[in-house]
Amino acid sequence: MSRFLLWAFWGSLGSGLVATAGLRADEPQRPRSDPPEIVSSWDDLTNGVKTKEDWEQRRAELHRRFLDLIRDQHKPVKPPLDLQIHETVEVAAGYTRQLISYAVESDERAHAYLAIPQRPAGETGPLPAIVALHGTFPQGIEQAAGLVDDASKAHLHHLVQRGYVVIAPEHFVSGRRIPPEGAYDTTRFHQKHPEWTAVGKFTYEHSIAIDVLQTLDIVDPDRIGAMGHSLGGQGTIFLSAYDSRVKAAVDNCSAAFFRHNSGVEHWSRDRWYVYFKHLRPQLLNGQLPPIDFHEVLALSAPRGFLDISGINDGPRLTQKQRVLMLLKVADVYEMVGAPQNFEFFVHQRGHSVPVETRELMGAFFDAHLKPQSATSARRVNE
């Protein structure tokens, strides 16, 4: 082969290599290197933690801080459930939907929709179940049932068709318990429970929804999940940290954390929905609580958890910090020997529940709450 042909051959095959080889003076030089260590403020989750035993000690302390954050010590004595069925509807999509109520305080009842799938003839045995938490919508459980508003948020309707028993409880200031001040106004709650928190209240009530599921013969008490969007996503994070009966959890578009959040005082605003009333003085003084969301999320380890968020759901820099936060939570799952149980998905569809995330939620629950045979890939038999 002539010198000209050799040059033409290498030129056509390796033209893209010329610049990276540094042969042009006007191109930046990029030497090979190992990946640098990622350092962030979220590293405090595992500072000083080297072993699984170290983590168990750290976890115990974080759990104490979590219960103190929600002021769990001020919750009321749990009353007998007194479960009642108010309405039963056979839905054409192949399930039964019931409107139920049950006691959550001595003078308060919660309502919920309960959906039970119709089973093929001859199929027996208990089914997995999910607590589905709605967002900040006045008729939240009607939305979850697909009866009003945005059908992409019809979580009860979507999940029961995948074979799950689903309970969708009303948030305590929505639906049939909207106070005179309006939906999601917590003024009267704080008057009744001045030392408690709204987060403590909804977490306590969502845990009672698990009690309801466990009274049902058709539910496998060891295969219960939780999920929610927006306010329901926050509720899912807290419920999974609070109640170890949650074996798999999915939060979608939950709010930002405490640190790196220019609107952190909204967690303790002085009107409408007040999450943590007792935090307001220190937040206004520039001081954050002694626990943040990466530490609350890590309390779910090693149980299954999937976080779904939009990089454009709020300030982009804050949402980018969420990715760093989730990477650190993944380190905890690695430390406890269950890296496969923690996942996260980041999209650019804002504060929404697009089709790909709905499918991802269902597949995640299938992987964690159904037998392996239900999700195993199979070869084609011709």
Image (cartoon, helix red, strand yellow):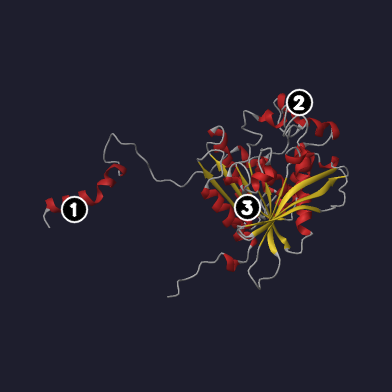
Q: Of label 2 and label 3, which has the lower sequence position?
A: 3
**Residue highlighted by disc 1:** 9
Q: Nearer the viewer, residue 242 or 350?
A: 350
Image position, residue 40 (x, y; %): 58, 39
Q: Tell me the SS state at disc 3.
A: helix
Q: How crowded is mark 3: few (under 14 residues within 10 Å), some or many (20 or more)?
A: many
Look at 81% across and 34% down and name the residue there: 189
User: Image quadrant for the N terminus?
Assistant: bottom left
Look at 63% across and 63% down and name the residue there: 370
Look at 62% across and 43% down and name the residue there: 148
Tag of residue 49: none
- Dots 2, 1 in contact, CB < 8 A: no
Query: Label 2, label 1: how many angstroms apart (C-alpha)?
Result: 72 Å
Query: Label 2, label 3: how many angstroms apart (C-alpha)?
Result: 42 Å
Q: In this view, does 191 lie above or below 16?
A: above
Q: Is residue 273 left or right of residue 3?
A: right
Image position, residue 269 (x, y; %): 71, 27
Q: Which amino acid does label 3 sit on?
A: His
Q: Of label 2 and label 1, which has the lower sequence position?
A: 1
**Residue highlighted by disc 2:** 281
Q: Residues within 10 Å of mark 1 (few under 14, many from 20)?
A: few
Q: Is residue 326 above or below residue 89?
A: above
Q: Is residue 108 left or right of residue 57?
A: right
